[in-house]
Amino acid sequence: MTSKKSRRRGRFIVLEGIDGSGTTTQLKYAAEWLERKGELVHTTREPTDGPLGLMLRQILRGRLVSTPGAVSGDAKPQPMDPAAVALLFAADRLDHLHNEVLPHLEAGRHVICDRYVLSSLAYQSLETDLRFVRNINEKALAPDLTIFLRVRPDVAMQRIETTRTTRDTFEQLPLQRKVAAAYDKLLEGYREGTVTILDGEEEMSMVTTRMRAALDTLF
């Protein structure tokens, strides 16, 4: 009886950074490069395109809530409780892991994700207790590699202003500065897998080259 050789489990790679740091662009380049090397790759993002992720995207863009007796068109944006938002991110993440990330990893594909737990810790901790955010994300799978693109908030905002027609609630310079500071503090003690910090303000081709070098450490 011949035994089948078990397929190698895929690696879980995460790209992180403030809005406008270039994670989405570099994710595309990372996937293309790995595929050229003959690797199987699946790309994804958080918030996801699932039901919880779509809800989060609506919340981040400013939701409209109808109140009893309100005349059509009178609804005004209502703030969402920060702890509820943090819980939604954590729930979306667990659903993401169960239905998308883990099945692809077990099938031997490398999964590259645009944003993950570190984003929740940086963004949600601005209005919610950091310990609470950590606790609700403790079941999340640790990445094999996190690549953080460090970009100054004013540079990131310039990119956003020249490339995007719509923004979410975090894409404002004062908030970007707070998020960047939160990321820097978190990275000092972040121990969930290997973390590589790159200068996201370098020429795009150089950032891509350095990212490939970081990925090479996994293979």
Image (cartoon, grey):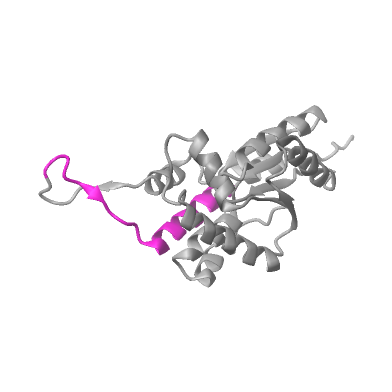
Q: Nearer the viewer, residue 162 or 9?
A: 162
Q: Nearer the viewer, residue 29 or 41?
A: 29
Q: In terms of image quadrants, where is residue 118?
A: bottom right
Q: Nearer the viewer, residue 6 or 9?
A: 9
* Residue located at (71% from left, 33% from top): 29
Left or right of residue 55, residue 3 in this image = right
| Image coordinates for residue 54, horizontal then vertical, percent | 43, 42
Q: Farthest right residue?
A: 1
Is residue 95 found inside the magenta-colored segment of the image? yes
Q: In terms of image quadrants, where is residue 211?
A: top right
Q: Quadrant of the N terminus?
A: top right
* Residue located at (84% from left, 36% from top): 4
| Image coordinates for residue 56, horizontal then vertical, percent | 42, 48
| Image coordinates for residue 193, horizontal then vertical, percent | 74, 58
* Residue located at (66% from left, 47% from top): 15
Is residue 215 found inside the magenta-colored segment of the image? no
Q: Quadrant of the C terminus?
A: top right
* Residue located at (43% from left, 42% from top): 167
Left or right of residue 17, residue 71 in this image = left
Left or right of residue 63, residue 155 in this image = right
| Image coordinates for residue 114, horizontal then vertical, percent | 61, 44
Q: Is residue 19 above or below residue 28?
A: below
Which residues make up the magenta segment?
Answer: 71-97
- Count of numbered circles on the image: 0
Left or right of residue 64, residue 146 in this image = right
